[in-house]
Amino acid sequence: MRLIIAILLPFLLFFTIGRPIAGIICLILQVTLIGWLPAAIWAVYALSQYKTDQKIARAGLR
């Protein structure tokens, strides 16, 4: 579900993963039609980093 959000509404993804400042910057980037593609790519990358961080955190607790 977050991947769909990352592609369609990139700025919203940053708010769901707890990075509101990046979300605001992404929204400013996404306002332009040309900036939407880099914003979507950035959001997908940030989502993959978030998932990796979650896996590392879970592994560290065990």
Image (spheres, rainbow, N blue to C red):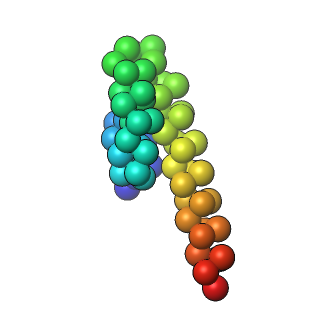
- Looking at the image, residue 35 lies above or below residue 50: above
Q: Quick one: 57 or 34, which is closer to the camera?
A: 57
Residue 59 % position (x, y)? 65, 76
Residue 30 % position (x, y)? 38, 23
- Looking at the image, residue 55 lies above or below residue 23: below
Residue 57, by quadrant, is: bottom right
Q: Residue furthest bottom?
A: 62
Q: Quick one: 7 or 62, which is closer to the camera?
A: 62
Instruction: Please give left or right for residue 34 compared with residue 5 in the image.
Output: right
Name the quarter where the C terminus is drawn: bottom right
- Looking at the image, residue 17 lies above or below residue 9: below
Instruction: Please give left or right for residue 38 compared with residue 15 in the image.
Output: right
Asked whether residue 60 appears in the rendered view, the answer is yes
Instruction: Please give left or right for residue 48 compared with residue 35 in the image.
Output: right
Q: Quick one: 10 or 4, which is closer to the camera?
A: 10
Q: Residue at x 42, y 52 (%)?
A: 17
Marker count (numbered): 0
- Looking at the image, residue 12 lies above or below residue 18: above
Q: Residue at x 59, y 51 (%)?
A: 49
Name the quarter where the N terminus is drawn: bottom left
Residue 52 % position (x, y)? 62, 59
Q: Residue at x 45, y 18 (%)?
A: 35
Asked whether residue 30 appears in the rendered view, the answer is no
Q: Residue at x 53, y 33 (%)?
A: 41
Residue 34 % position (x, y)? 45, 14
Q: Quick one: 62 or 39, which is closer to the camera?
A: 62
